[in-house]
Image: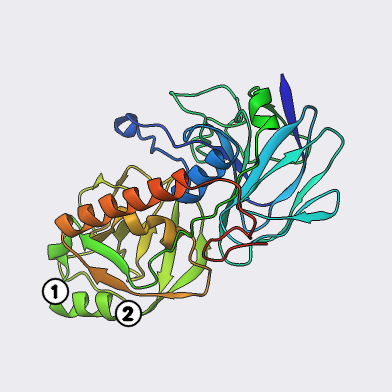
Amino acid sequence: MTTLTVKQAGPMMSVQDLGRTGFVRMGVSASGPMDGVAMRIANRLVGNGDNDALIEFSNVGGQFEVDEPVLFAVTGGAVSVTIDGDRVDCWASHTLAPGQVLRIGALTSAVWGYIAFSGGIETEPVLGARSTHLRSAIGGLDGRRLAPGDVLPLGATPETVLAGPQKVLRTPLHRFAGPIRVIKGPQAGHFDKAAWQQFLRGPFTVSGSRDRMAQVLEGQEIVATGGHDIVSDGTVMGSIQVPASGRPIILMAERQTAGGYPKIATVASVDLPRLAQALTGSQIRFKLVTQEQAEDLWIAHTLALDEVLAGLGQAPDAAMFEGGRS
């Protein structure tokens, strides 16, 4: 079996696949990637399936070695990637041979990065998935963050993959640069017209209080005239809670499955990756859309991503992406 050794590990580095479903009633949210688009592209670049497990990291990568030849790809944003000190492109696949050291630096245009290795990471599935759920301490490698010295099993890399042409992202995937689109939340009626005007006018600043569970926004305080305490009910990734502090909290991949704060809105699925990748200190605004509009946006996004994935291949020029090459 091929193995991957972690020589250095940045913060919040973990094993993730597309996440586990069907266990919300047990208090276990899906987990999975913060940026599913970047994850899917990374896997496709090395010939993996969309749900193969890879490494997600926050802000800073690390150093890695393998004991058999593999392909790897790094996505998420612009970042320095080197093999034995030689620079290579992100958003493209490359061969890593035994004895070589892969080094991944700090992201400069994003928060969450992804490192896919051909064959995928084959840690033992828990509840049907390999995703690490840090707060529940399940999945991944012993349910925890990766650390120097960890050894991860990789699936076999077919000779045809190693011998075939390496791939690059050659069709640009442009992410919408406007406000974050939201639909009304289940407790939208707890907020009067003035509160809604404040919420939609903004702007809000992405604070440093953020992790895989949630991210807190700073800005004008939003007051729930209907009260800031409710009987706990279900949450989804993208639920925007407003506690008594008036500072909105956006729930993310490892959210709690129920909460007792009113939820003013829910981030449209199409904008969740963009929100997750918003740099700390950056400003965001919200725009209200209908559920039907959000569904149409998701369909259009899915078709555009399928086109990008179908266009992966050899290209003489640099990989193209918003934030693009290393």
| Residue in view at x 38 percent, y 56 percent | 272
The kind of secondary structure element at disc 2 is loop
Q: Which residue is pictured at 56% across the width and 55% down the height?
A: 76
Q: Nearer the viewer, residue 136 or 100?
A: 100
Q: How many marks?
A: 2
Whether residue 50 appears in this view of the structure is yes
Specify the amino acid type for callout 2.
Answer: Gly
- Residue found at x 47% / y 28%: 129
Residue 145 figure quarter: top right
Mark nearest the camera among 2 and 1 is 2
Residue that mark 2 sits on:
202
The three-letter amino acid code for the residue at tag 1 is Asp
| Quadrant in which the C terminus is drawn | bottom right
| Residue 279 locus on image (x, y percent) | 53, 68
* Nearer-N-terminus badge (2/1): 1
Q: CA distance from mark 2 to mark 1?
A: 16 Å
- SS class, disc 1: loop
Furthest residue to the top?
1
Q: Position of residue 112 (x, y in %)?
A: 56, 55
Q: Nearer the viewer, residue 191 or 86?
A: 86
Q: How crowded is the residue under tag 2: few (<14 C-alpha within 10 Å), some, or many (20+)?
A: some
Q: Quadrant of residue 137?
A: top right
Q: Is residue 113 left or right of residue 306?
A: right
Please indicate whether residue 80 sits to the left or right of residue 161 in the image.
Answer: right
Quadrant containing the N terminus is: top right
* Residue placed under numbered mark 1 in the picture: 192
**For the point 36% across and 53% down, which residue is it?**
304
